[in-house]
Image (cartoon, helix red, strand yellow):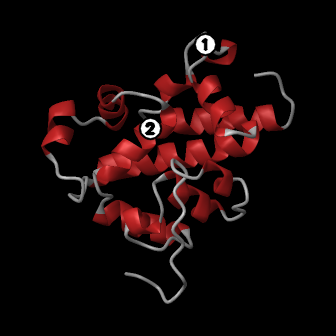
Amino acid sequence: MKSKKEVKVINLAQEPQVFYGIQNKYDRIVSVLGGSLQVGHVVNSDIDLIEITRKGLPKSVILTVSSILGVSMEKMSALIHVSHRTIQRKQDHELLNVYSTEQILEIAQVISRGIEVMGTIESFVAWLHKDIRGLGYKKPLDFLDTSFGTKLIKDILGRIEHGVYS
């Protein structure tokens, strides 16, 4: 359901510099996903995120998020627990199931938070692909496939933000 609020069309993948001026966490998440038009819903609260999760995101957001993360579609399919072949069969406008949508939203929150903490998309993505001591010399990217993993990465980002060695 669209609200009467003006729909913002901001796409992080196409206009990363616009992202840095966005103060609202929900607008940042929508930007990561490709903008309000791609998401198909205005997001102003966690309730809106729940509605989107139940409805499903279009397959096209997978392409957007994989582009931001700098990963292949095979890796994205592993992160959201859907076979690569299933993703290939879907049209861009077809909706993903609740579980895949929820995981993509979790990943979008991590991306948003990571850019906020690291300062740039490039710095955050480079960090995601590095082996991190606090993760047993594993890459943060490899923890984005579960809600517990995304929470762990957000916690580490919070520690980094506050200057705690992580």
Name the spot of residue 67 as percent of width and height, x first.
44, 38
Q: Is residue 95 above or below residue 86?
A: below
Give the label, 1 or 2, closer to the camera: 2
In depth, the one of 9 and 136 nearer the eye is: 9
* Quadrant occupied by the N terminus: bottom left
- Screen quadrant of the C terminus: top right
Q: Residues within 10 Å of mark 2 (few under 14, many from 20)?
A: some
Q: CA distance from mark 1 to mark 2?
A: 21 Å
When asked about the image quadrant of residue 2, the answer is bottom left
Q: Amino acid at mark 1?
A: Asp
Report the residue at 34% width, 38% height from top. Answer: 80
Q: Is residue 38 left or right of residue 47?
A: left
> Which numbered disc covers residue 131?
1
Residue under numbered circle 2: 67
Could you say where residue 130 lies in the image, as x and y percent from the top left? 61, 16
In the shown orientation, is residue 113 left or right of residue 36? Answer: right
Residue at far right of view: 163
